[in-house]
Image (cartoon, rainbow, N blue to C red):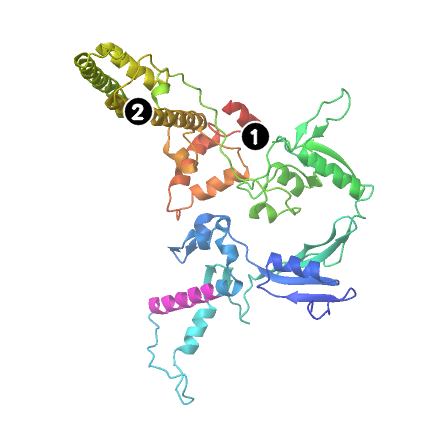
Amino acid sequence: AVETNLASKDSHWVYVNEEITDNEILELVHSALGRMTVIRQIFPLSRDNNQRCMRNNHRISSLLCDPQEGYLQMLQVSNLYLYDSVLMLANAFHRKLEDRKWHSMASLNCMRKSTKPWNGGRSMLETIKKGHITGLTGVMEFREDGANPYVQFEILGTSYSETFGKDVRRLATWDSEKGLNGSLQERRLGNDLQGLTLKVVTVLEEPFVMVAENILGQPKRYKGFSIDVLDALAKNLGFKYEIYQAPDGKYGQQLQNSSWNGMIGELINKRADLAISAITITPERESVVDFSKRYMDYSVGILIKKPEEKINIFSLFAPFDFAVWACIAAAIPIVGVLIFVLNRIQAVRAQNASQPSPSASSTLHSAIWVVYGAFVQQGGESTVNSVAMRIVMGSWWLFTLIVCSSYTANLAAFLTVSRMDNPIRTFQDLSKQMDISYGTVRDSAVYEYFKAKGTNPLEQDNTFAELWRTISKNNGADNCVSNPSEGIRKVR
């Protein structure tokens, strides 16, 4: 429709496509002029890793059941249905064999029209209809009419704003049990907030939300990056706000009784209209509240106290190994002895030729001193006249130049590396050591991530299991903190 210019300004297209992705939806919305409504199937996953990764008492790879792996999101819907179809068929075969109701079948020729159908086909179809599995598309079973009562759909539509332009948002969801959940009416953003005063809940975390200097008798003021975003929204959309901190200081986690704490709980219980902070968008949170488009991505980092610098008086010898220093120490007296011998030979020859004696050092310790002075690039007072001594001293000077240059370069590299040296660089390094205790913010997205990975029985790498064992020690009271500021103070 877009390519043929049928999506005009006055048109309204409804797309029913299970395979359409978020990127394709955004491309359609921004390339078409008219309104659009997209209907596609959604596949909610169980929060329990053990339940989510079990298929008829058999565990499958976490790549196919853990939404945090990302691989599951890349599969097409047809692939998910293909997997569940094979699973349903295998379940039916298994039940037939268990009930001893298997009908043997002769070879069939699909190309011949006169081939006799399999006698057990109708019985197998009834067994399939009575089956119940949990596949990649969720729970799958069939009613009498052959429909799956657990199928869920989401309805997306275009939204308009004078400030932000055209965008797409979820209008409603539908399932056979609850029916339509939401409204299909178009809502134009930017007008319904004019003049309203919204209650905003937040959690302190620098540099996103911080307490500003307050004036006695006036409400507490806040500052930070998220507050600047909130101020810009309030100015553009024409609303006012009253901001307060979450009573428990948490972002939001689902509890055992299915209720939520933190900012998410404040929104669900309608004590707040809006939440703003450095909160991470997770599938669990997104199932109960609506998030704006993310405006900042950041990865997980390890905050560790800088190790104290240890003074070592022998650090100047570190650029070379002990064997190199031993060779240098041995080379100085050897070359000194060689210079002394050549000097004595030159002196004898000078006496026989009735020539003045050479001015080179005539004693052994003087020769060694000359060699040492050349090594430390301080020069010497002797004059080298013979060809043999010039060859020896020239070779020694070249050797000295190479050694001093290598030492200078290695010393600079050694000082730089030692300054940047950190024993913990990855999660593997963190899990293998026992000297440093570690934790994170309780009930945060990182906390839930380590919990999900550490308690997943399908994880082949025990790194996250070791990490979670330390983080959850004494129910997280030993190593975890209630907010990021407390964690920074604890590290210091």
Rendered location of residue 361, percent (x, y): 26, 11
Residue under numbered circle 2: 394
Toward the right, the furthest residue is 195
Q: Could you tell me what secondary structure mostly forms the magenta stretch? A: helix
Q: Amino acid at mark 2?
A: Gly
Q: Do labels 1 and 2 touch, CB within 8 Å?
A: no
**Front position in the image: 38 or 443:** 38
Q: Tag on residue 484?
A: 1
* Residue 154 counted in the magenta span: no
Query: Viewer-proximal residue, 110 or 9?
Result: 9
The amino acid beneath tag 1 is Pro
Q: Is residue 179 visible?
A: no
Q: Position of residue 121 (x, y in %)?
A: 41, 78
Q: Position of residue 483 (x, y in %)?
A: 57, 30
Element class at badge 2:
helix
User: Which one is nearer the viewer's eye here, 125 or 165?
Assistant: 165
Q: Horizontal placement of 163 versus 104: left or right?
A: right
Q: Give the residue displayed 45% in from the left and 51% down from the top.
A: 51
Q: Is residue 432 left or right of residue 164?
A: left
Residue 453 location, quadrant: top left
Asked if one can make out residue 133 in the rendered structure from this viewpoint, the answer is yes
Q: Marks 1/2: CA distance?
A: 64 Å
Q: Quadrant of residue 470?
A: top left
- Would residue 485 appear left or right of 71 to someone viewing this image? right
Q: Is residue 469 above or below residue 67?
A: above
Q: Does dot 1 land on a helix, a strand or a loop?
A: helix
Task: Please report the bounds of the magenta region as a residue range.
Answer: 82-99
Numbered disc total? 2
**Which tag, 1 or 2, sits closer to the chain's start?**
2
Where 166 sits versus 298, above or below? below
Q: Nearer the viewer, mark 1 or mark 2?
A: 2
